[in-house]
């Protein structure tokens, strides 16, 4: 039995749900939970009760490394004028689907 | 103080397009089910069965709903309310079926709001006051395990409507049982105080087991699940006690049911036929 006092607040988790038709998990919000398993059931109760999902990921917020707002320009702006990186300059054969 | 914080980039959103969508593909559990009473089914017995199961669900739902604004955590409040709504949904379908087959033609509101305590057929464990969180969890563990076993059997009922309602309930109750089992383990294997409270709660609910078994004998399923959960939680099995006299299925209830019904039915009885 673990007798160490619990922290005053449960840690924060980020929730990702894969919708019925979606292909990837999408961030939908966050919640507090005492452990990973509880985070999963809380996510089920909080974020899929309107029939939104078929799969859930939860991850401790502290385990996410995110780019900051300050980095927005150096990170993303340089790509804005490089249209040649899009594969729109190729002729796609008629018999190639899904492009 | 922990080092968690909401990630700004995650909280930001990006205008929200396609980021969130309500679910689709809702299903009516009774879609395409023939509501004609099969010739070989005893209508009175079916009605009594539906009524009893509906009353268990309605009273259980009402007790769980009492946790709203009082639960230890916001997330748990919603979890308990979700479970209550599942049960309420089962009760509505069962009352509707009861009204179809008992010859009275009553609707679900008539059963829920216009009967007195002595007319209710729920097992008494469902009507006991909430107590602390551990008691609510212990009761939920017993009731959901027992009801799951019951509905699993009824999913093969000769009445197609009851079978469809039961099949829908099985999926819901599997989650309720899992929720209760996980909290039983968490409290039993938690601190000294949580262990003490969980043990005390189990000791209070176990005497009501014989009443459940008399209504539907699922002692094998319930016993197996209880033993497994208690073992994982490090909780000693509660002492076996003699059955309590009386039975909720006969309309014999504790003094706690009438006040519960007064709150549940007050508005509907003060304004008969009102819609809102």
Image (cartoon, grey):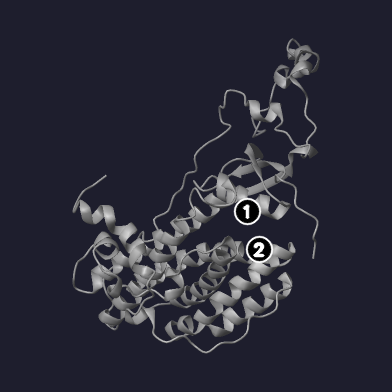
- The verdict on a common chain for dots 2 and 1 is no
Q: Quadrant of the N terminus of chain B?
A: top right
At horizontal 63% and vertical 77% (from top left) the residue drawn is B226
Label 2: few (<14), some (14–19) or many (≥20) C-alpha neighbours in 10 Å: many
Tell me which residue sits at (53%, 67%) in the image: B140
Label drawn at residue B182 = 2
Kindly identify which chain the residue marked by label 2 belongs to. B
Residue A41's label in the rendered image is 1
Q: Determine the secondary structure under disc 1.
A: helix
Evaluate if marks 2 and 1 touch, with contact meaning CB atoms under 8 Å apart: yes
Q: Position of residue B82 (x, y in %)?
A: 49, 54
Mark 2 → mark 1, Cα distance in angstroms: 10 Å
Against B60, residue A62 (above or below) is above
Q: Chain of mark 1?
A: A
Picture coordinates of residue A90, whole percent (x, y):
72, 20
Image quadrant of residue B262? bottom left
- Would residue B98 be seen by someone viewing this image from the given angle? yes
Question: For this view, does B216 lie left or right of residue B35?
Answer: right
Q: Position of residue A53 (x, y in %)?
A: 57, 47
In front: B116, or B24? B116
- Taking the spot 29% from the left edge, 84% from the top edge, the residue there is B40
What residue is shown at x 38% (from left), y 64% (from top)?
B58
- Camera-side residue of B89 and B29: B89
x and y percentages locating residue A75 in the rendered image: 79, 18
Q: Residue furthest top?
A: A81
Up-down relation of residue A62 to residue B131 (above or below)? above
Direction from residue B11 to residue A72 in the image, left or right? right
Decide if residue B154 is on the left or right side of residue B35: right
Local SS, label 2: helix
Which quadrant holds residue B55? bottom left
Q: Is residue B174 shown to the viewer in this render?
A: no
């Amino acid at each position: 039995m673990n007798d160490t006092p619990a922290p005053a607040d449960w840690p924060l988790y980020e929730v990702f749900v894969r919708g019925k038709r979606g292909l990837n998990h999408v961030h939908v919000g966050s919640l507090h939970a005492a452990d990973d398993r509880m985070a999963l059931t809380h996510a089920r109760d909080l974020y899929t009760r309107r029939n939104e999902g078929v799969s859930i990921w939860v991850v401790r917020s502290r385990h996410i490394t995110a780019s900051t707002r300050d980095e927005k320009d150096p990170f993303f702006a340089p790509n804005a004028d490089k249209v040649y990186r899009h594969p729109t300059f190729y002729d796609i054969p008629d018999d190639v689907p899904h492009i | 103080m922990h080092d968690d914080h909401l990630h700004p980039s995650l909280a930001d959103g990006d205008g929200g397009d396609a980021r969130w969508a309500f679910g689709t593909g809702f299903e009516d559990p009774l879609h395409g089910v023939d509501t004609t009473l099969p010739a070989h089914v005893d209508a009175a017995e079916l009605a009594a069965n539906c009524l009893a199961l509906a009353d268990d669900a309605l009273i259980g739902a009402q007790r769980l709903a009492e946790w709203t604004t009082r639960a230890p955590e916001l997330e748990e409040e919603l979890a308990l309310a979700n479970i209550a709504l599942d049960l309420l949904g089962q009760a509505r379908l069962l009352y509707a079926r009861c009204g179809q087959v008992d010859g009275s033609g009553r609707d679900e509101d008539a059963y829920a709001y216009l009967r007195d305590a002595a007319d209710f057929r729920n097992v008494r464990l469902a009507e006991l006051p909430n107590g602390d969180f551990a008691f609510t969890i212990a009761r939920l563990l017993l009731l959901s395990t027992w009801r799951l076993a019951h509905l699993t059997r009824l999913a093969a009922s000769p009445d197609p409507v009851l079978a469809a309602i039961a099949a829908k309930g099985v999926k819901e109750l599997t989650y309720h049982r899992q929720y209760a089992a996980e909290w039983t383990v968490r409290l039993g294997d938690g601190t000294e105080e949580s262990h003490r409270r969980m043990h005390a709660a189990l000791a209070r609910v176990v005497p009501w087991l014989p009443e459940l078994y008399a209504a539907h004998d699922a002692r094998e399923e319930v016993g197996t699940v209880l033993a497994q959960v208690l073992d994982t939680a490090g909780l000693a099995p509660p002492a076996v006690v003699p059955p309590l006299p009386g039975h909720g299925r006969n309309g014999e209830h504790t003094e706690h049911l009438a006040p519960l019904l007064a709150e549940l039915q007050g508005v509907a009885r003060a304004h008969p036929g009102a819609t809102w």
